[in-house]
Image (cartoon, rainbow, N blue to C red):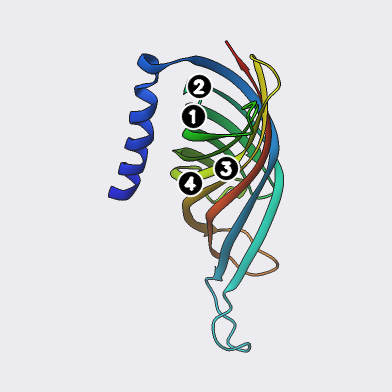
Amino acid sequence: MKTKSLILASVMATAISAPTMAADWFIGGGVGAQQNTYKGSYDPVLQNPIEGGSQTQHLKETENNVIYEVRAGVYLNDANRVYGTYSYNSDDLSRQQSFLMSYDYLVGLGDSNKLNWFIGATAGMNHISPDASTLDSKNRFVWGGQTGLMYKINDKVSTEIGYRYLKQDYDVSGPTPTPYSGAVAGSETASLNDSQQLYLSVDYRF
């Protein structure tokens, strides 16, 4: 918990200082793909003595679905920016809504400085709503980083392609009062360790 608090505090401190250092504010939006790898298990209340041993079933499934995002922030100068992002992702197992704060360091590539490589850190909150009615929705702290390429189309408009990794800590359990895969009632667990995003966005400076 201490590590998570320090990560969030560092990103927030940079963002709070933005108004006094601001050069260019921007708004934008993007679309991409998010990969979520879930793990889970089902443990029946009644064990079948004929089969012998535990009949616990384990599941590992990777979901790839579209992610949508909107964001707003500020370029402190040519090499630093901070921004907040809201993103939405839905797959067969859950729906996720993320509220993230990010910082990027930009490195100009070439004399024109139109193409920039960026790398940075992200921290925030993710709300996960499982499709299984027996599992509760949860708010979870997430953190990670991103990198990619940003291209300035003109003084107002830029576009970028990026990759973001988010470390998650989602782990829930609940009863299964109705038959599951033909088995008797029992309990199930679900966890999501991390998510990976590949996105394309367009920003407007003002």
Q: Tell me, yes or no, if residue 8 can be seen here.
A: yes
Quote the CA–CA distance across marks 1 and 2. 14 Å
Q: How crowded is mark 3: few (under 14 residues within 10 Å), some or many (20 or more)?
A: some
Residue on which disc 4 sits = 144
Measure the alpha-carbon separation of dots 2 and 3: 17 Å
Question: At 54% from the left edge and 53% from the top edge, which residue is drawn?
Answer: 194
Q: Crowdedness of circle 1 by 10 Å Cα count: few (<14), some, many (20+)? A: some
Work out which residue is located at the far front of the displayed protein and give it: 111
Of the image marks 1 and 4, the number of the one nearer the N terminus: 1
Nearest to viewer (mark 1 / mark 2): 1
Question: Which structural element holds mark 2?
Answer: strand
Q: In this view, does 201 lie to the left or right of 145?
A: right
Residue 197 is left or right of residue 189, and the answer is: right
- First in residue order: circle 4 vs circle 2: 2
Instruction: Determine which residue is flagged by label 1.
Output: 79
Spatial CA span between label 3 and label 4:
11 Å
Real-space Cα distance between discs 4 and 2? 18 Å
Disc 1 vs disc 2: Cβ atoms closer than 8 Å? no
Callout 3: helix, strand or loop?
strand
In the image, what residue type sits under mark 2? Gly
State which mark lies toward you, 1 or 4.
1
Residue mark closest to the camera, 3 vs 1: 1
The residue singled out by tag 2 in the image is: 73
- First in sequence: mark 1 vs mark 2: 2
Amino acid type at circle 1 is Ala
Identify residue for label 3. Answer: 147
- The amino acid at mark 4 is Gly
